[in-house]
Structures are given as structure tokens and as C-alpha cells.
Image: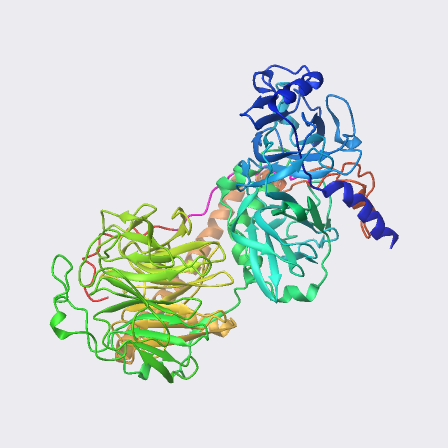
Amino acid sequence: MAGLLTNVLILLPVFQTICLGFRSPLSVFKRYKDTARSLPSGCLASNRPVISLGLSDFALDIRMPGVTPKQSDTYLCMSVPLPVDDEAYVVDFKPYASMDTVHHMLLFGCSEPSSTENYWDCDEGTCKDKSNILYAWARNAASTRLPKGVGFRVGGETGAKFFVLQVHYGDIGAFRDKHKDCSGVTLHLTHQKQPLIAGMYLMMSVNTVIPPGEKVVNADIACRYKRFPMHLFAYRVHTHRLGKVVSGYRVRNGQWTLIGRQSPQLPQAFYPVGHPVDVSYDDILAARCVFSGEGRTTETHIGGTANDEMCNFYVMYYMEAKHAVSYMTCTQNANPEMFRTIPQEANIPVPVTSDMLKMAHGHHEETKDTDKSSLLQQAKNEGEEILDQDFHIEEAVEWPGLDLKLGQVSGLALDPENNLVVFHRGDHVWDESSFDSNFVYQQRGLGPIEQNTILVLNPSNAKLLRSLGKSLFYLPHGLSIDKNGNYWVTDVALHQVFKLGPDEKEPLLILGVALQPGSDKNHFCQPTDVAVDPITGSIYVSDGYCNSRIVQFSSNGLYLMQWGEGTGTTSGRGRPGQFLIPHSLTLIPDFRQLCVADRENGRIQCFRLETGEFIKEIKHKSFGRELFAVSYVPGGFLFAVNGMPYPGEVEPVQGFVMNFSTGEIIDSFIPLRKNFQMPHDVVASEDKTVFIGDVHARAVWKFGSTEKSESTVEARSQLESNPASTDPLKKQEKQHLVHQNSTGVSFLLITALLIIPVIVLMAILMYIQWRKTTVSGADGEHKLDSSSRRILGRLRGKASSGLNLGNFFASHKGYSRKGFDRLSTEGSDQEKDEDDGSDSEEECSAPPPPPAPSSS
């Protein structure tokens, strides 16, 4: 109990956030004139720390007064009085710092600073009273902007009267030229009363221990919320070098809603929450930090040095002014059992390229090469380190889906009950006579398909549960299902997109003009697929065979925007944002991304949902020329299927399982009973059950996951090396080839056995002759040994020293280090990683393919 009380007493002055205030611009200048200090030229813009921005607004420049730290890991503090007495609001922050000189900055608000000096060593503390965190910056983070109508309240009767800036100078090497540093932040303040008051909620682990060599260690924090509603709008993560990913959630009625998820190795900005998250009374706020102790030889504790760790998840929120609380903290895990249901994404590292690492880590040259290479390697392989990959996809041979009487299968989806929904073309066929050169459908005389084109099947036994879509479509293509169970389909003959209710015979919404191809806001040209954002209801259409764009509509079908262009080539080397048949869409709601199977470019492109900004490309040589479809499963898995190889190419048609974060292929799979002909769509469930629809085979395959074993891997490698071996019609050819190969191997083996003794005998004779004429053999052996020792020496590294965090950590149970005297919510991240190469997927460089098949 005494230890717990000590922790609480020390935490209180560390983490409390603030409120600010003031009067008029004239009084601002008058008051500040009495307290302004003489600072080196350039530290404050035009030596004017307070700048009027109008009748009610002003800017306050808070900068270090030209300091030169004497040693690495120095913490310096300085204070600036709020230049008004009345209540005011901070509505914007703009940092002025570089990672080359500053490791991180914190801005506190308080009633009285710990010192009246121009600046002081933060060992003396930041504030004499409670200190509330207003702002944090690290690793070249961008500016933090607050939403309109939101501000941190300061001044007045209860708000902070002083700002205290704390700057951590990580690497003393940046000051070899003895220059004076003026890093800091500029605040935008206003007199206008803000209806919503900002605050800071900090979740922090205080007792995590990372065993040496441990591959995955989780630090979990969770607290039940017991106040008035708050709205979360920004988040920030923080660990030291062992941190892989930090994720924060709101848990309500057992449902986990993501607040934010980020790599702590990236610039530690306050990132905007992807979609609005409100927190109500009795909700739970939870966070998880994932660490790896690999490369460490001793236990790693929570602390402030580079060899310690931290686990912090900050949330910026706003509340109604009358209920506003300026800060809140959570340092416990109230319910460890609840983390059994945490979304799998929390265990999947965010990919960090070597360029990002180089940008993010800009201090401490003492960090050894072994640490650098180890961190880079971990960043390259982090997905396969933490993502559960011990499974293999195999065909469910007992599933009767291959016996279904279907037309060309163009689309698959799973409904909210996890039933399989199939979209097929009945007795219609897409062939070379279906369209003219202007993409106008030429077989309208056939009328619409008379069969039900949408079939709902039991995923266990393929039993038909219900069907619909009769007399609605000419050439079905894409299918997706929204969270409410509505079907979204495309028809390439009609050039339209349809929304159908699960029990409705008539469409609820139609986009596009029937039978009229086009490329404006009201027309499509052979649209291929649809995706619907479960959060906003926005509709995304891939358009298509004769357009090369993604079009976004509002939930009620109003045009919003579009992005994308044609590649202008068939080389499979399109630039980001270029398409050659955007063929399939999948939403990644966990990451607010939309991924596109860029078919003829043989790749997956992913874009930011809100802006269409290109995020990344996933491309592998094993994809071959074409990639037809892609499907995402919550938990970080991406499933895809490619096309048949062109003549002379060797990559087989197959399915793929990938780590979404890293893009690495985890597994590939093919059917056992009947070969793929043109697999057209893929859909997967969270239990890794996979369905693939084939437009030419007119079939639907089911695949399931099994644990990997040596026999499974061996059988799989045999299948992959002989993908046609499952075809009964090719058994004789296969046996003939095997016989020829074994004969050739036998001949080579006999020849080698005859030649090797002769070579050995000649080597012995040469060695004897050499010994007669040479006497320096021992010296040569000695030199070789010395060289080996030098190489081994380069592989050794030392743990670098770091910063003490504070007596809080020293007093924590089980943590006995002494001498901690600095107090901060941040620690030292002393790594300075050099780029020794980066991952890139191998590009496909085959000659241009022939024109795309007409039937697809």
C-alpha cells in the first residue's frame, strides 16, 4: 500500500494537463514588457515573443534562450508567463525544432515554475505545483492542430499562469560547433470563448518487464471511464527502441473500437483519430504496447534510459466546457482477461521503412552497429515475428461446391451471418462478340438473365438458402456486402452499380446510366467492383475495364471525388495511382485504407480512404502478369488470387496469403481436385476459411487453414514444383518426365563417383610437393586466425548509456535502480540507425502481354 501511495504522489505532478487565458492585445504587450528577457538574436522572431493576430487573438513564442548543453541526455527547462490575467484558449501549436539537436519537447502549464532562472536543469523539476502536459513533440513530428471550437483553457481563476518548456537534448554531437539552441513552440491563443475544452488522457504502463531474448511481450493498460462524455480527436504513442506497435481502444459492451495505432519508431506526432470516437460513462479505455526483447541479455524495465523502456498512449480529447476536465491518467490494467479478445491488429507491427528509421532516429552516435542492424532487421521482419503464421491453406475436398450448377462465377462475398453469397452469369457468357469497339453491349436482344444471379449458400455444406436477382442483370461482375447485409453489385454490360436489400426484388439504389458507357460523374465504363465504408457509408467503385479510376460517392449516391489514371503501357510497371483494369476492391477499415487489385499491372495498390492518397504497393514475382482479386480479413491478413501464366511464363495460377502490414507472402495454395482456370474473385473469413470463384471453370472452391507440419510443407513443396500433377490427364507425362530425370541423375552420380578419387589423389600429391618447398605454413595459419578475430570483433556491440527518468521508477516494486532524479513522461530513445538497405518487392519485367481476355 505504501508503494502504491508513493506512485500516485509522484505521478500526479507529472501528467496533469492544463487550461490557459488572457485579456486584450494591448494589455498583453504591456504586461509582457515587464517580464521580457534579453535573448540572443534569432531566438525569438524579431525579438517579439508576443505577436498580435487581431482584436482577440495573439501568438506566444516560447523558445529556449540560446542554450548550449554540455553533455548528451541533458534536460533543460525554461518558463514563460501567460501575458494576460483573463481566461484565454490555446487553439494551435507550431513546433520549431529539429531531430538533429532535440530528442523531444514537452510543454507544461502550471501556476508557478520550479525556478525563476532564465533556464535551468530539469533535475530541479518543472513546476512547484501540479504540472499539466499541454503538448509533446518528438522525431520531427508535424504541427498539431485542434478542431474548430476546441481549445486548451488557460488563465483566469483556475487556469495555468505559466508555460514551462522542457527540452531533451539527446546527442551532444550536434553542438560540436558550440552554437546556441533556440528550439521551442509557438502558441496561437484567443480571447474568444471556446465551447469545447481540450484535455489530455494518458495511458501508461509502470510495471512491464521484458525478459531477455523474449520474442513478444505485451504491456496492457485498461481503466474504466467514470466521467462526462468526451470526444477523442488525436493520439500519440511512445516507447523506446524495443517497441513494435502501440494501439489504443475504446471498449464498449465487449466491442473494441480503434482510437489509434502506430509504430513508436515513426515521428511521434499527435496523429488525427481516423474516425470520431466518443467515450461515455462506464466505457473502458485500453492500450497495448508490443515489445521484443530479442538482442537483450538482461531484463528491460520501465525507465528513462535508452536501455529501459516506456509504454505511453496519449489521447487528446474535448468535452463540453461546463464538464471539462483538463487531464486524466490510467496506469493500471483493471481487467487482464479482457485482452484475450483484443483485435489481432494490435499484435501486428506497423511497417517502418529504413528511410523512416533514419529520419526518426537522429541522435547518439554511440549506438553500436549491432544495435542498428538488429533494429533494421527487426523492422523488415517485424510482421512475421509477431503475426501468427503457423498455418497452411488447403482445399476442403469434402465441400460439394464444385458440383453446383452455375454460370460464369464473377463475384463472391460473405454476408453478416457468414453465409457465402455467389454472383454468377447464368446462361449469359462474356465473349469476344459481347461489346463493340466503343464498349457498347451488343447482345441486348438476349434480354436480362432469367435465372437468379445471386445465390446465398450455407458455407458448410453448400446448401442453397435463398436466391434473388432474376431478370435484373446482363453481365454480372463484382459483388460486396455492407454491414447491414445489402448487396452491392456491378454489371459490365449495363455499366451500372446496384444496391439491393437481402430480401428486396428491386434495387434500392442505382448508379450509372443503363447501357451507356462513359467517364464522367454520372457514367461508368464496365465497372468492376464496389466497396462500402462501414463507418461513413461512402461508396467506392472501381471503374473499370475501359476507365482507370476509383470513384467515391456519398452513402446516398452523390459524387464526391475520384482518383487514378491509365498506365499508358502494358508493361506491368504502372506508377502509383495508375491502373490497368482496377479489378477488385477490399476495405481495410482497421487502417482506413482501400486496396485495389490492379489486374494487368499484377499488383495491389492501397490508398487512404478519406483522400485517395497512395499509401503502398504490394507486388511479387510470383503474382505473374495478372492479379485478379484481393480480400482483407481483420487481424492483418490479405488474400489474393492471380491469373493464368502467359505462354513461356512459369508462375502458376494460385491463391496467396499475405501479411497486410509488411506485404510478405505467408502462404500460397492451389486446389487438389480440379485446376484453376480463371479464378476471378476471392473472399475470406476471420477463421481463414477462403472461397474462390472461377469464371471459366464455373466453380467455387473452399479452402481451410491447418497447422503447418513437416509433412504438410513437404507435400506443399511437391505440389508447387509440379502444379499440374493434380490433373489426371497429365499423369503419364509427369511419370515420363520423372523417369527421364532419374536416369539423368543416375548417370551424373556414377560419373562423379569415378572422378572424385582422381581429384583427391592429385590434391594429395600437390600438397606433398608444396610442403617440400614451403616453410611458412604456420605463419599463414596464424594470420588467418587473426583475421577471423577481427571479423568477429566487428560483430560485438555495447549497450549505450541513457537518461534517468525519476525516483518514481526507482521506487516501483521490483525495480531497484538508484539515482533516478529526472522526472518526465518521456524517455530517451538513444538509437541512431543508419540505413543499410531497404525492402522492395521484385518487379515483374516480362514483355508486354497480349490484349486482356474479353471474357472476365
- In this orientation, which residue lies closer to the viewer: 506 or 251? 506
**Image label count:** 0
> Residue 806, image x and y in percent?
78, 40
Does the image show residue 601? Answer: yes
- Relative to residue 703, is residue 118 depicted above or below? above
Horizontally, residue 822 falls left or right of residue 62, namely right
Is residue 238 toward the left or the right of residue 685 in the image? Answer: right
453 in magenta: no
Please state the horizontal and vertical placement of residue 155, each as a whole percent of the image.
Answer: 69, 33
Quarter occupied by the C terminus: bottom left
Horizontally, residue 818 falls left or right of residue 744, namely: right
| Residue 419 occupies quadrant | bottom left
Q: Start and end of the magenta stretch?
A: 827-841
Q: Measured along the vertical axis of the image, is residue 815 above or below residue 183?
A: below
Where residue 206 appears, x then y in whole percent? Answer: 74, 50
Image height of 119 relative to 353, above or below: above
Residue 781 visible, this orientation: no
Dominant secondary structure of the residues highlighted in magenta in the image: loop
Q: Is residue 121 above or below residue 622?
A: above
Residue pictured at 63% horizontal, 40% vertical: 793
Q: Is residue 832 magenta?
A: yes
